[in-house]
């Protein structure tokens, strides 16, 4: 059972709700705060044997806005059939929810300072403040480049701050790397923010999910598992929220099957509206790891543009796209990297499709 309080509920009123819940045996109330568009929203979740708890034990309390019985498993990340349930969160002055679309364009893997600075400069020129920079790379082969790790963090963050980057999406593969990132951000004076990325290979690494959930500072970019069902990915994602970090973006990145050939993965962006209906999470699409190659289609647009566009026209809130100043020389995923010259074109292209999406929603939404 989820009890949503009215905005601005006093500490005393919240305490009254918690005490009312504690009267029921076998029921454990837990308090959560969510970042709503119009301020913080408090929810009290009743876990345990809630069958015998009547809803009106709470609806009569003046601070209570709504009481919902949840049967689904995604207690924290689920939308529970309520279109009005708050989605998303604020971070570093940016809003991440279904009303916004952010382009996170950057290097799959950090290699040199020059490339990082060139990437940031290209983004700044387009007024983009969100990027991706991989420092820790989980690779299929142990002999492939594994990322520069902690040594690159000071200059990746410092340069980000100098170029006005507000959020850097960065994958982590274990608890120690989270600490290294938090430490480097602190030492650098928090010049930028970081969104901790859980890669598809770690989707069901429950210890890692717990670790990212236990830190309160950085939001999380959770990539769906490439070989498991959507439901299994959502359950895994709930681990992060259940440990205390509700600020999560859910990223689609294609699923592994030869049916997707010649693409690297089978594009799964038709799941954007499914995720938006089932969860309160902003949805990201990653056309780079889905398509896996920089190939120009007969109409002149890169296949990656087309895949990105498919995400935008079904309502994605974020795009994660690999770029590199010199794709041929990139140490990881060069074949799928777009060039810096393609950045303004991608930006304009997705802006145009976003406008088309909003127009269509207005024109065709069911009343
Ligand atoms: C990545 O975004 O760099 C990455 C490795 O993606 P995925 O985990 O989706 O393969
Ligand atoms: Mn990659």
Image (cartoon, rainbow, N blue to C red):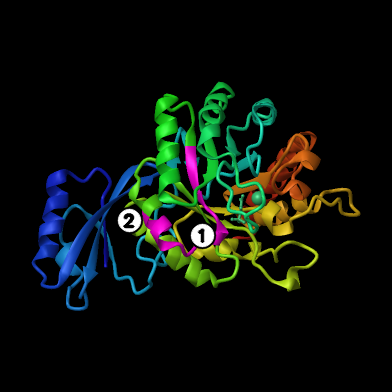
Nearest the eye: 82 or 305: 305
Provide residue 184's location: percent of width, then percent of height: 44, 32
Label drawn at residue 243? 2
* Residue 367 highlighted magenta (yes or no): no
Judge the density around disc 1: few (<14), some (14-19), many (≥20) Cα neighbours within 10 Å. many
x then y, percent, for residue 316:
60, 53
From mark 1 to mark 2, how far is it between C-alphas?
A: 17 Å
Whether residue 84 is visible to the viewer of this picture, yes or no, is no
Pinpoint residue 233: horizontal percent, then vertical percent.
50, 66
Q: What element carries label 2?
A: loop
Res 127 quadrant in image: top right
Residue at horizontal 39 percent and vertical 59 percent from the top: 207
* Foreground disc of the pair 1, 2: 1
* Residue 108, visible in the rendered structure: yes
- Badge count: 2
The residue furthest right is: 298
* Residue that appears at 40% across and 34% down: 183
Span of residues in magenta? 194-210
Measured as percent of width and height from the top left, residue 22 is found at 11, 64
Q: Report the side of 325 relative to 18 (left or right).
A: right
Say above or below: 39 vs 3. Answer: above
Is ligand 1 less than 8 Å from the beta carbon at label 1? Answer: yes
Tell whether 185 sits left or right of 20.
right
The quadrant where residue 169 appears:
top right
Upstream in the sequence, badge 1 or badge 2? 1
Residue name at image x 44 percent, y 52 percent: 87
Q: Which residue lies furthest to the top in this view?
A: 162
């Amino acid at each position: 059972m989820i009890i949503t309080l009215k905005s601005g509920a006093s500490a005393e009123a919240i305490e009254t709700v918690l005490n009312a819940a504690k009267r029921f045996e076998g029921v454990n109330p837990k308090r959560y705060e969510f970042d709503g568009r119009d301020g913080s929203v408090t929810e009290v979740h009743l876990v345990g044997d809630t069958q015998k708890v009547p809803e009106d034990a709470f609806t009569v309390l003046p601070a209570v806005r709504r009481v919902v019985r949840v049967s689904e498993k995604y207690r924290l990340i689920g939308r529970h059939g309520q279109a009005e349930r708050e989605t998303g969160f604020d971070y570093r002055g940016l809003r991440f929810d279904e009303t916004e679309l952010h382009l996170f364009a950057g290097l799959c893997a950090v290699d040199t300072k020059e490339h990082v600075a060139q990437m940031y400069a290209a983004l700044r020129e387009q007024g983009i403040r969100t990027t991706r920079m991989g420092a820790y790379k989980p690779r299929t082969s142990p002999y492939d480049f594994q990322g520069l790790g902690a040594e690159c963090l000071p200059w990746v963050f410092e340069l980000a701050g100098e170029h006005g980057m507000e959020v850097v999406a960065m994958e982590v593969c274990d608890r120690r790397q989270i600490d290294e990132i938090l430490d480097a951000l602190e030492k650098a004076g928090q010049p930028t923010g970081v969104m901790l990325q859980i890669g598809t290979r770690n989707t069901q690494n429950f210890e890692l999910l717990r670790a990212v959930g236990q830190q309160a500072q950085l939001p999380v970019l959770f990539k769906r598992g490439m070989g498991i069902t959507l439901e299994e990915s959502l359950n895994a994602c709930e681990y992060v929220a259940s440990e205390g970090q509700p600020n999560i973006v859910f990223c689609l990145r294609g699923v592994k099957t030869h049916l997707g050939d010649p693409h690297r993965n089978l594009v799964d962006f038709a799941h954007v509206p499914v995720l938006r209906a089932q969860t309160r999470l902003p949805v990201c699409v990653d056309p780079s790891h889905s398509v896996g190659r920089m190939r120009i289609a007969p109409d002149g647009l890169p296949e990656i543009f087309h895949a990105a566009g498919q995400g935008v026209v079904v309502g994605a809130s974020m795009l994660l796209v690999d770029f590199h100043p010199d794709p041929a020389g990139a140490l990881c995923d060069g074949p799928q990297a777009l060039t810096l010259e393609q950045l303004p074109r991608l930006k304009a292209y997705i802006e145009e499709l976003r406008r088309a999406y909003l127009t269509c929603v207005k024109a065709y939404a069911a009343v």
